[in-house]
Image: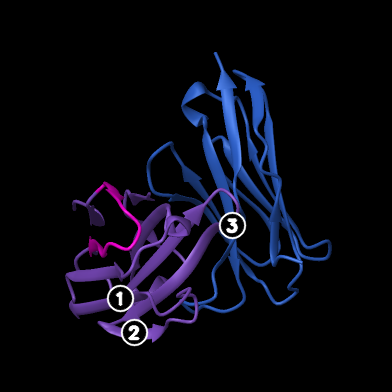
Amino acid sequence: QKEVEQDPGPLSVPEGAIVSLNCTYSNSAFQYFMWYRQYSRKGPELLMYTYSSGNKEDGRFTAQVDKSSKYISLFIRDSQPSDSATYLCAMSAYSGANNLFFGTGTRLTVIP
Amino acid sequence: DAGVIQSPRHEVTEMGQEVTLRCKPISGHDYLFWYRQTMMRGLELLIYFNNNVPIDDSGMPEDRFSAKMPNASFSTLKIQPSEPRDSAVYFCASSYKSNQETQYFGPGTRLLVL
């Protein structure tokens, strides 16, 4: 079983829709959770960063962590065509450099 | 700040040839990471450096892969000899010591080994 599981999609939604992206994980020690956005032929860029459980909101983006279910989500409200990208979740157990585990990414297309 | 710089952006080579990928991290960052991304396996950490010293190379697939960081502003990832299964996008990333989880990625090198 992989440490982090993420549905690869692809996911297509109309502009203005609410998007829900999800990851599950198996290691209960994970406590740092990140979402990266990767545009086509570009490197991943950090979108959201949360520690432990709870919600974090940044503009149209909300990151949610449910440690009891080992489940994290990224919600995008009022989705825009510019949100079309691959979204990767990542997580780690320690504040250390060598144990960042990535999901395989979900490809999202927002249709105008 | 120009961000993490990688070269070349694309590389096409024949099996058995040596391939060298280059990376310039963000100035002042203490950590440098090399990743490989494929459709099947996603993003995999190959090796990372702290203050130019290799810390963990357990992700390097085999002896054909080697990485160096001769100074704080330059790193190389070398594959010798290259094989078709090495075809992937290779990313370099860097981060501050105090915030290792927030890594800044370069644009990647797309490698195709024929």
Q: Chain of mark 3?
A: B
Most distant residue in the top direction: A112
Question: How far apart are labels 1 and 3 at the CA level?
Answer: 21 Å
Relative image position of residue B33 (x, y in whole percent): 37, 69
Chain assignment, label 1: B
Q: Amino acid at mark 2?
A: Pro
Q: What residue type is disc 1 on?
A: Ala
Q: Sequence-wise, which precedes: disc 3 or disc 2? A: 3
Which residue is denoted by mark 1 in the rendering? B67
- Which chain corresponds to the colour purple? B
Quadrant of residue A91 within the rendered picture: bottom right
Q: Is residue A76 above or below residue B80?
A: above
Which residue lies under the disc numbered 2? Answer: B54
Residue B42: where, in percent of width, then height?
Answer: 56, 55
- Magenta-tinted stretch: B9-23
Residue wearing tag 3: B41
Give the residue at x 66% y 67%.
A52
Residue drawn at x 23%, y 77% as measured from the top left: B69
